[in-house]
Each structure stands twice: as C-alpha cells, then as structure tokens.
Image: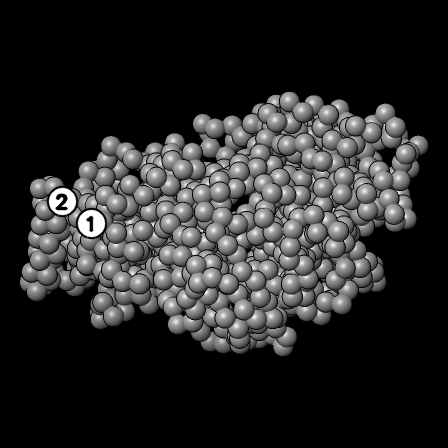
Amino acid sequence: MTPETPLVIEKLTFRYRDRKTPAIRDISFSAGPGEILLIAGASGCGKTTLIRCINGLIPRSYKGEASGRILLNGQETVGWALAKISQTVGTVLQDPERQILGTKVLHEVAFGLENLAMPRPEIIARVDESLNYLNISYLRDRETFNLSGGEKQKVALAGVLAMRPSILLLDEPLASLDPASAYETLDMVRRLADEGMTVLMIEHRVEDVLRIRPERVMFMSEGQVKYLGSLEGLEKVVDYHEVKLPAKAILERAARDPAPAELNVLPGVSSQDSPQSALVKFENVAFSYQPETEVLHGINLEIKRGDVIAVLGPNGAGKTTFVKHAIGLLKPKSGNVLVNGRNTREASVAQIASTLGYVFQSPSHMLFAPTVREELAFGPKNLLHPKDQIEKEVKEALQIVNLSEMEKDPPLALSFGQQKRVSIAAILAMHSRILVMDEPTAGQDYHNYMSFMDAILQLPGFEAILFITHDVDLAVIYANRVLMVADGTIVADGSPREVLGDVQRLEKCRLVPTSLLSLNLERWPRTGRFLRAEALAHIH
Amino acid sequence: MLVSWRYRQRKSLIQWFDPRAWIIFYGCFLVTSLLSWDVRFLLPVVAISVIVLLTSGLKWHEIRRAFLFIIGFIFIFTFLTFLTGRGGSEVYKQEHLIRAFKAPFSILGWTPTLKITAERAIFAVAQFGRVFGIGIMTLLIPYSLNPSFYGVTFRGIGLPDKIAYAMDLTMRFIPTFGRDFQLTMDAQRARGYELEKISGGLFAQVRKLGPIFVPVTIHAILGSEDIIDAMDLRAFGIGPRTWLEHLRYQPRDFLLIAFGVVMLVAGFVLVFRGYGVLWVPAALLHLAGG
C-alpha cells in the first residue's frame, strides 16, 4: 500500500461501551482516489459504526473499546482532532434533516468554513463554487426549512464539499429521496469520484447504486466483511434475498431454486365480496396549511375492500397530507372525507383508529413504553380490547415483524430498523380494518422489509392496505392499485400495469422505471400480472 | 433540522433597528420593568410595549394564538394572586379592607373569606401591567428577528462564539420542540390515545402523559446528539470562527441604545426617590375607609 492511498483500514475492531460484543471486527481494506466503494449489508451489521470510526465520531463522541489502525493519506488518525479529520473526510448523514443547521442555504453551506475561521470573501467564493458544482445555485438564498427532500440532500452535500474533503462518506444518502432525486444524487457522486474523490457509500438500495458502477462492493454481516470485490462477484456470492440485486441477476439465480410460494393477499376479503361500499371516501377534498398555499386540491377517491394501494409521487407532493386526512388528523378545508360512511369532521381520531390504523414515518415520535410488549399493547388497550385478545394480538404482531425474541427489550434501545418494525407491529396489534403505512420500508434492509410486507399482506384481519412509498418495486410486487400524487392532486389511479406502464408519466412524477418493472412489462403477455423476480424466473 | 419561528421582513419599528441594538434595548426594558411596583412607573413601560406591538406590522392572525395564550396566562396568574393575596405579601405590609366576602359554610371551624383590599387590587394591576409589558416585548422578538442573525447578534453583544451559537440553536429549539410535540400527539392519537380523556389522581394523570412526554423528550435528546455530531463533523468549536453575516450599526441604533440606557438610569433614579414601592391611590384608600 502506498502512503498516498487516501484511506487504509487495518484490523479495525470496535465495541460500544454498553455492548458486550464488538459492533465491527477485524476489518481491513483500503480505498483509492477516484474510487466508489459501496458498502451493503443488513441493518445492524456494523456499516454505520465503520463510518463513525473513519470520520472520527468514534471514539470522540461514541465511547468504547477500539483496536486497529485508520490511516488517512498515509497518516494514522489517532489523536487527531475531529476538526482536522473533517477537513479530509466529509460525511453526509442518512437523513439530511439531521445534518442541516443553517436557516438559509447560504449559511448551511458556509457553516464548516465559518468554523475554520476563513475570511468572508473566501467563504462566499467557496459556497458559490460548491453550489455551482452541484447545479443548485438557485437555492442559495432559500430557507432550508422549505426545501424538498432531494434539495436538502444536495445542500447537505454542498456543505460538506465546500470544506474540500478528499474522502466522502455517505450514510444511506438515498433513503428519503424519490427515485429521480436519488439518481441525481448518484450522478453527482459519480462525478465527484471521477474527479478524484474517494467515496464510501452505505446504501440498502444496491440496485440503484449499481447504475453508477461503483468500483468495488463490500458486503458486511455481523460486524465483519463477508465480501469485498467487484460487482459481478457480489451478484454471485450474496443471497439475493438479503441484497436487492438487479431483476435479471435474481432471475438467473432464482431459476435454480424452488418457485416462491404464492402470496395469499388479504385472505379475509373474499373475491365474491361486494366491492360497492367504500371504506374510505374522499369527496372533492382541498387542504392548505397556510391560507395562501393550497397543498391538496380536488381529491376524489374511494378505498374499497380488497384494495392494496401504493401511493407514489415525488418528495413534497402531498402524499402524507393526503393520508393524514383519512385518519382525521387533518380535516379538509373544503370537501369531505368519509371513513365507514362517517365524516371525519364528526369523529375523533381515536374513533377512526379502530377502523383505520396509521403507521407514521418516524418511529421515534411514538415509542415510549419500557418494553416492546407494552408498546404493542398500548393501542389495543386504548381501543378497549379485552385482555385475552390483547395478548393474542401482541404475540401475533411480534411474530409478523420478527421481533418475538425482543418483547421484553425497551423499544427505545433498539436499532432504527427494529424500532420501525415495532412501530408497524404497534399498529398491527390494533387490528384495524384498514392499514395505512407511510414509507414502511425507509431505513430497512431488503430482507427485513420483504419479510414483513409478505406477512402483513397475508394477514386475515385487514380489508384494505395503503402504503406510501418511493420504491417502485414495492408497488410492482404488492399493490393491486397505484395512486400517483403530484402537486397535491391525483394524477393517476389504476392498476399497476396501467399506471406504472406509462413511462413518460412516471418520469414526470420523478419516478424511474426499475429493472423489475421493465421485466414485468416485457413479460406481461405471458404473465398477465406483475410478479417479483423470483416468481418470474419460474414462468416460461 | 431545527425549525425557525415565523419570521418575515416587515415595515416595522422593531425591524428598523440593528438586532443587537434591539436586544440591548430589550435588556434595558426588561430590567426597568422589574425595578418597581409603582403603577405610575409601570404605565410608560406598558405604553412602550403597546407602541412596539402596534408598529410591529404583525397581522392579528399571525400572533392570535400566542397573544391569547400569554394574555390568558397573565390574567389567570394575576387573578390567583389577587384571590390568595400571597404574591404581594412581600411588597406591602399593611392592607386596607374594601370588602370581605364570607363563604356561607365552615370547614372545621374555618370560614373561607375573600378579602378585597386596596393593596391587593393595585398590586394586581401592577403585576398585570409589568408581566404584560415584558410578555409582549418578548413575544415580538421571534416574529421580528431574522433567524439568520440570531448567532451573530448574540456574538455582537459580546458573547463568546460557542455561547452565541448555542443561543442561536436554543432560539430555534422552541419551535422545533413544538413541531415534535405535535407529531407525537398525532402518532399517539392514531393509536387511540385521547389526552382530553385522561382520568385518575394527580400521579396517575402525570403517568398517563408518558406516551407524549417520553417520545418528545427522547426525540429532543437524540436530536441534540445529531446536531452535536453534525457540528463536530464540520469543525465547530476549534477556535474563533468567522460569522458570515456582518451587522453594521447605524446612527439610529445608537439612539435606541441611548434611549434604553436613559430609561434604565431614570428607572434607578426614580426607585431611589421612592417610586419603587407599591403605590396605592388615595381613591382606593378612601374606598377602604382609610
């Protein structure tokens, strides 16, 4: 290894102070200039710990026991101040919301430079250079609070780039982005690497990242590196149930395995049931937070028994505002929302909750109980379910989200992915007739979210399910109806084939056709329905 | 991310001045308000706050909730003090009874009695005026001070970099806390939780607030850790920093500061001349037969 290699890690092991086992063990690798190293692996496999070791947050902010060496440009970082490391290593966190400090874009991008006590003219020049580089100069004087998810991510990146690091660490940068924003971010990352920057990117959305051809891929499991090498090698060594690979790669490998079991979607709803009465009805609904800006306009919609609806659309389209009306958290400024025939203006949220369960995007806003079991029992208790029934509901919900072994653990001590599953289980335990989920898969690894989506769809209690997602494949695999929301209106409502088959409309709504969608469209004459890649592999 | 207050650039007296000058003036106003219980002394103080409010350019719908909350809080607070007579017991020694209302029942030989005295009545007026003036002037700051200038303003009045930036973050933490509180309320209501139906004794009621306060508190702590990480990762606190915004005093700002200082000095002079204590108008004493 030459001393110029930007990043060298030698036998790195770290154990958090309050844990018994190391979070990462015996990790060694190096990354060269101009290289993109994609780091993949299940939630809790040690990816974020590795990033924290490199950027210096470990051991400075997160205490524990460390061994091994980290060398930046040939120099060991032990004893370096975080400020010194931050001039070489730039970090963009998973959620830009957590990283942005400035009230205006200009101040946000300038923050690091101000801290380095640079003269004002130089700060301004570097801010402008950074914004120009990312093609977001038009955002310079905007308030950060009013930016879309994609814009926030770019601004966070600009703030890091302004400090001119030679190594860039990206911790799930695509997690909260719509597909078009994710691709724009990825293209920028490729450009940075092509100009000599070393990039380490943690990402669950492996298929999306493959588009920019990362030089190498590292696959981690249980704190260790299980694979480090080329993309082609990854597709051969990892389990396609664990990492989301391109549909064609899955197709080849799944053909050798037994065909997956057919999903029995919403088994409580018989195909002979009359679909006449709507469970939820939106009648010409309009809504605005501020009098001058309408967020939703003219929403007309019925959710019927048997519907599995995917709501797609760009960041800031009004998707969450729309579903908050269904549970009565927001009341329309004009028009009506009827749940089970009852106007939401005349019912409390608690009353609606027994019919419609709503899983919020962020689990940390709802978890409070000392144990997972008590957390799950909270909703059913509020709805005055009998004690015996609550026991059963809690147990069943725990099994679905694969957390039975953690029922006595405090939910707040779990990882983000596990907390998300607890938040879903907490609503499942309420046994509502309709389930609404806002971004159920965000921040989850592929294996986990596919397992619980399979389980949820096959629960007998639900009559309809609606989920908001940026993941087109989730709509392809699970939905029987797709709603496309843009600029506060429903621009398309129909079967997945009708809505997702219109590529132009997809692109207008900042969505991008995936390899699975393309494969399904291609094979439609033979299948007559959308299927997951594993199932497609067995249809000839 | 920290949320900002609903600031807008308006044509207003308060925004005509440099924010540092306004904060210094506000400090002088605050101390002056706290110097005296004399209604004659407090009257101009209240008048200043009303003038600033009326020239603030704020629309009623913008401040309605906050304004009504503050007024309601001050009113209840003052009324309770008036009923119990406890708040002013250190301010006045002697009371002149205007009228007493005796309850038509006794508890273990004690008959609850509401005494209206001249001192209690004027103390209630003074207390309302003082807290009203301070409340209004404080309420106007977040609506009128540009959030981008928080840090540089506090730095500009002499606080060290770290404390100035901490003040900036603290100012923005309050609306952020409000947003998180609302999100948690919504999430728990969606689980059938109804805050308005909480019952039981005091401790049981506090315990039942756990589903709201635990997530809000934990979120605030985790949010703070994220903020600290984000700051550390961009070299915050390594030494003196540059503040991108550069504030420049205008002659009017010096006038405002001078006015604030004169007001403060005049306040002290008046207090030394005996205007710091509770003043009871002769008419009230006359009503009490004194």
Instruction: Judge whether residue A514 can be spotted in this image.
Output: yes
| Mark 1 lies on residue | B20
Q: Is A108 positioned to the left or the right of A38 in the image?
A: left
Chain designation of label 2: B
Between residue B18 and residue B73, name the one nearer to us.
B18
| Mark 2 lies on residue | B249
Q: Name the mark on residue A233.
A: none
Question: Residue A177: where, in percent of width, then height?
Answer: 57, 41
Amino acid type, callout 1: Arg
Vertical comparison of A10 with B27: above or below: below
The residue positioned 73% from the left and 25% from the top of the image is A501
The residue positioned 22% from the left and 41% from the top of the image is B14
SS under mark 2: loop
How many residues crowd mark 2 within 10 Å: few (<14), some (14–19), many (20+)? few
Instruction: Judge whether residue B115 can be spotted in this image.
Output: no
Say which quadrant the C terminus of chain B sits in.
Answer: bottom left
Chain designation of label 1: B
Mark-to-mark CA distance, 1 and 2:
9 Å
Q: Quadrant of residue A496?
A: top right
The residue positioned 64% from the left and 58% from the top of the image is A228
The residue positioned 75% from the left and 24% from the top of the image is A498
Q: Is A287 positioned to the left or the right of A284 in the image?
A: left
Q: Are marks 1 and 2 in contact (CB under 8 Å)?
A: yes
SS under mark 1: helix
Question: Residue B258: where, in percent of width, then height?
Answer: 9, 50
